Amino acid sequence: MSKPCIICVAITGSVPTKAANPAVPISIEEQVESTQEAFEAGATICHAHVRNPDETPTSDPEKFARLKEGLEKHCPGMIIQFSTGGRSGAGQARGGMLSLRPDMASLSVGSNNFPTRVYENPPELVDWLAAEMVKYEVRPEIEAFDLSHILKAAEMHKKGQIAQVPYVQFVMGVKNAMPVDREVFDFYLKTVHRLFGEDVAWCAAGIGANQIVLNDWAIAAGGHARTGLEDNVRLDRDTLAPSNAALVKRTVELCEKYDRPVADWKTAREILGLRAA
């Protein structure tokens, strides 16, 4: 298989702390340095959250602006994807950084259970976030925690609420949400192809020890892969990941296993239909 594989690195997230793994980058400076290492290792999308000094999550646009500036300087050409996830803020504060015009942003189009809470994405907020992404020419990545989220993305695309053919990421392994199940994965993929075409770009993410499992399934099936310390802080049960770059390198090795070239940033932008850097 010669189809290039895009590697997304989710560098920080809203949950992992330095107590869990000292390599989790919290400050803007740490995030930029960690992303630069991951970029050099083969990642071409940076999925970014920002944190306060006490490690709590935030949607502060000023912090996102500083991170974007640092990434553009030290990782030229890399695709910057901001999170609009619900752990970082409430209501429209979740999209307050979209006016900064990142290349991409995550978009969850439906609600589901998380380990200790309901991940709420009410329809009016989803519609508003999608409208802001259209307004500022930000390509959404649909984070699908459930089959209904893929179908909702198709409905929104048909209505013009999502400008381009949806780029869907299957998220599996979140406790109380969709477990890692190969038959479900295969049906997700079948559904994406049925709704959006056989050549549509898609991605997959696995949580915790399942990160490497979903990397393997996605790369083998012709999709793109997400890795990083947001989703998983270990290389194995006994070994903490020393960096985001280490997790990227592991994903690169899977690409080699399946004869998938790793997409450089120019190729990744072409595949995703993004504007030039």
Image (cartoon, rainbow, N blue to C red):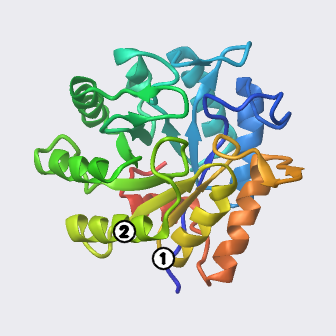
Q: Amino acid at mark 1?
A: Ala
Q: Which amino acid does the dot numbered 2 rest on?
A: Leu
Of 116 and 94, which appears nearest the observer?
116
Residue indicated by mark 1: 221
Say which residue appears at 36% left-offset and 38% top-offset. 108
How far apart marks 1 and 2 lie (CA) works out to 9 Å
Could you say whether the residue bearing mark 2 is in a helix, strand or loop?
helix
At numbered mark 1, what does the secondary structure look like: helix, strand or loop? loop
Residue 80 seen: yes
Residue 44 location (% of width, % of height) = 59, 55
Q: Position of residue 205 (x, y in %)?
A: 54, 54
Pointer 2 residue: 189
Image side of residue 54 versus residue 45, left or right: right
Taking depth in this image into account, of 268 and 214 the one nearest to the observer is 214
- Front position in the image: 138 or 259: 259
Question: Is the residue under label 2 in contact with that under label 1 (CB below 8 Å)?
Answer: yes
Farthest residue to the right: give it: 238
Q: Earlier in the sequence, mark 1 or mark 2?
A: 2
Image position of 173 (left or right of 22): left
Left or right of residue 244: residue 203: left
Q: Between residues 100 and 21, which one lies in front from this camera angle?
A: 21
